[in-house]
Image (cartoon, rainbow, N blue to C red):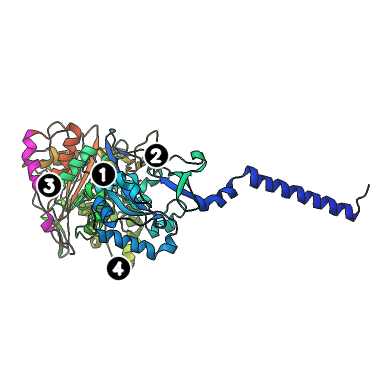
Amino acid sequence: MKLNRQNKLLIGLCTAAVILIVRLFCIQIIDDDYKLSAENNTMVYSIIYPTRGLIIDRYGNIHVGNKVAYDLLVTPREVEEFDTLALAQVLDVSPDFIREKMAEYKKNRRRIGWQTVVMMKQIPQLQYMKFAEVSYKFPGFRGQSRSIREYPYNAGGNLLGYVSEVDARYLEKHPDEYKSGDYAGMTGIEAAREKELRGEKGYNIWLRNSHNKIESRYRDGEMDKEAVPGKDVTTTIDAELQNYGQRLMMNKVGSLVAIEPSTGEILTMVSSPGIDVEMLADIGKYYNEIASDPYKPMFNRAVQAPYPPGSVFKLVNGLIGLEEGVISPSTAYPCSMGYHFGKNKLGCHAHRSPLNLEESIMMSCNAYYCYVLRDLLENKDFESIDDAMDYWNKAVKSFGFGEKLGSDFPSELGGFIPDSKYYNKVYHKGGWKATTVISLSIGQGEIGCTPLHLANLCATIANRGYYYIPHIIKDSKEIAIDPKYKERHYTMVDTTHFPKVIGGMYRAVNSGYGSGGTASVAAVEGLDICGKTGTAQNPHGSDHSVFICFAPKDDPKIAVAAYVENGGFGATWAAPIASLLTEMYLTREIRPERKDLEKRILEGNLLDRVKVKK
């Protein structure tokens, strides 16, 4: 039977009516969203802040914990006449402080509306308890407890980072996750692992009556939400070693980084001068003091300072030379107080001559590596010096230099390794040769790297040719690390060449005083420390003291890089610091015969040597 136009219209209207009825049923009976929205004007949300996750060291020690703090909240529109002097006495503040706050709220009444705002933060427990006893006398005022950070070890301020109240800029970037009054990690691990550490806020819902007084729980708490605590984060850091490293670097400017070669796990990352952890718990109080410090304690030199590596870089050039076949372990070069070219000379200290590869590392001969770099850049296997330079650049970068290593620690700097394009731009194509860039042979010139790069170089040599990306978060049940941190990264140098330079590093430390070894101060009987000193030239003052080492020689457990600005020779400050840290990690104590050395380092103050902008 054919439907006429009238029947079609009737069916259409009936269908629309059924859809409308079903929709209204869902809205009014099944779905609470609209009802809740209508009731929002009478509902008050009392936020429950979650306990922030702990930061734990590699051995399960609490590196960053929590303690209870109390805030005083006020809902200005609920405030009735009260005794200002009485409240001031309870809170141990001046009456003028309270009057000024209330005047401010009154001025911004339209913007604040029925919002509850924080009037005082981190009230001492005694004041909070006094207020709690008499809070009924002050309608509109109430207390709120929240957890703040505490630090069992005075170690790792820059490393751990701080938690602070979010500002307008932060809210702009995270509009759906945070609200005014919330706290978040701003730097260091606190920022890098904010998502896991922060937890999830909860709330209790209360109802207002017609007089805007809170009357009862909404639906007897049925719609309340429990706060979800943050996840604990286990770091690779040894908290006690970190503390010791900071003590060694006290009153010095620079960095100290230690890595476990077999995993790439960072054991210690010291940037000095650093932030005292007591300041982190109340960063707002100390922020201006920290920010105005001329030594820049918030600047993490371990991953952000672009230093010249100095003589420790000779190890890289030596390994590339072995790989390219321009030298062998028996290759010997002369040194007459330096490398002479034309009327110029790159100087060196006095030592016997000529030297082979191991001896050149042991005595840190500058001339030897000038010959090595010249042979690399003038290698006839390459069509031009541009090709040779670009090969050198690529080989150096395979050690992790010249780019960000990819650590899970924020704000890592990539450093710089020059190539032919760079020199063609500076000198024009064909306008430079090996002697023009000869300072690259000893880790000077345009090379820039961080102490983390140097520690990674040491770990790479300890592993005989490969490294794991250095990282600071340990794999755990709560947090699985990225698989990339478990991958080996091999250099372009064959693994068979590494023992040839390790022999020189061993002799540099263990040959005994007077033998020519530049790092005999770092020797500890039985630990088989292998090391290399560096003295990085500094046009702005005294040279920088540099040292890398690993131990034990045949079963490496730790690789260390120490960089002390304006510290002079590598053996003067950096070598003792790195070796003391190594000894403490491997034996958990410093031997009696090394106590005088330890005392000199702990009491040493080099701050006057460093030129700072005040």
Mark 3 residue element: loop
How far apart marks 4 and 3 lie (CA) works out to 36 Å
* Residue 377 rendering spot, x and y as whole percentages: 29, 56
Please give left or right for residue 44 compared with residue 249 in the image: right
Q: Are marks 2 and 1 in contact (CB under 8 Å)?
A: no
Mark 2 residue element: loop
**What residue did someone put label 3 on?**
571
| Numbered badge on residue 125 | 1
* Residue 187 rendering spot, x and y as whole percentages: 32, 51
Q: Is residue 289 magenta?
A: no
Q: Quadrant of residue 172?
A: bottom left
Q: Quadrant of residue 69?
A: top left
Mark 4 residue element: helix
Q: Is residue 287 above or below residue 249?
A: below
How far apart marks 2 and 1 lie (CA) works out to 23 Å
How far apart marks 2 and 4 lie (CA) works out to 60 Å
Rate crowding at label 4 as few (under 14), some (14 to 19) or many (20 or more) other CA atoms within 10 Å.
few
Label 3 sits on what residue type?
A: Ala
Label 2 sits on what residue type?
A: Pro
Does label 2 or label 1 sit earlier along the sequence? 1
**What residue did someone put label 2 on?**
229
Label 1 sits on what residue type?
A: Gln
Main secondary structure type of the part rendered in magenta: helix
**What residue did someone put label 4 on?**
427
